[in-house]
Image (cartoon, rainbow, N blue to C red):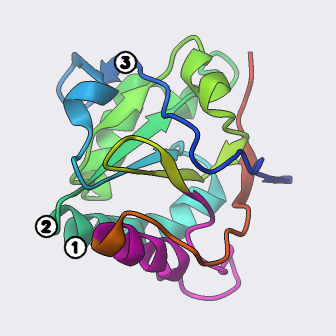
């Protein structure tokens, strides 16, 4: 497992729209349909990455808490399933159910959405404000596999601030995880 650091794109960047297969409903879903009028979290994840597996329990808990407060979470997998069949859409459905995701888990088959967002690793986290302007770009928390228990502290601090006043002035530390498996 080689660790890849996310790119830090400019705050204020507009969220690219998409229309992807939601593996939980087997229908297409767009950002405009799924977004929140308060805060929208777009996470690039996958089924097999140890960094994602490490945060799964805390991610589900955090998503439940913040969705009750008006935020929306959207997970996207962009990995090449020909070389990484564990990330295939039908297995994404199982993975989301097993991990009690309360949010859509979308499949980016042609990887165009990951490229549009500048996603580099899993997990890679982008939080947009009510106007879909980038307000937070960073890690879930400071933990990694075999080094601490994931809490989502960094993401939670950003969401608290964004939900309160639509901005976040705190540190934005790049996420670290497995590199997206490009075709």
Disc ID at residue 68: 2
Local crowd at mark 2 within 10 Å, few (<14), some, or many (≥20)?
A: few
Residue in view at x 21 percent, y 47 percent: 37
Residue labelled with disc 1: 65
Q: Residue 151 in magenta? A: yes
How far apart marks 1 and 2 lie (CA) works out to 5 Å
Residue 119 falls in image quadrant? top right
Mark 3 and mark 2 lie on one chain; the one further toward the N terminus is 3
Instruction: Tell whether label 2 touches label 1 (CB within 8 Å).
Output: yes
How far apart marks 3 and 2 lie (CA) works out to 24 Å
**Viewer-nearest of discs 3 and 2:** 2
Q: Nearer the viewer, residue 26 or 67?
A: 67
Which residue occupies the extreme right position in the image?
2
Residue labelled with disc 3: 20
* Quadrant occupied by the C terminus: top right
Asked whether residue 159 is in view, the answer is yes
């Amino acid at each position: 497992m080689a660790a890849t650091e996310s790119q830090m794109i400019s705050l204020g960047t507009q969220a690219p729209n998409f229309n992807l297969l939601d593996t939980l409903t087997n229908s297409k879903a767009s950002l405009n349909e799924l977004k929140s009028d308060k805060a929208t979290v777009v996470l690039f994840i996958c089924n097999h990455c140890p960094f994602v597996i490490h945060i799964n329990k805390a991610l589900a808990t955090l998503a439940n808490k913040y969705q009750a407060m008006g935020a929306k979470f959207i997970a996207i997998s962009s990995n090449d399933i020909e070389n990484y069949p564990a990330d295939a859409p039908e297995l994404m459905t199982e993975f989301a159910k097993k991990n009690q995701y309360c949010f859509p888990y979308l499949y980016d088959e042609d990887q165009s959405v990951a490229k549009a967002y500048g996603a580099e690793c899993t997990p890679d986290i982008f939080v947009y404000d009510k106007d879909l302007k980038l307000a937070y770009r960073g890690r879930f928390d400071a933990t990694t596999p075999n080094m601490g228990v994931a809490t989502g502290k960094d993401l939670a601090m950003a969401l608290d601030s964004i939900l309160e006043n639509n901005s976040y002035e705190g540190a934005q530390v790049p996420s670290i995880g497995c590199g997206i498996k490009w075709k």
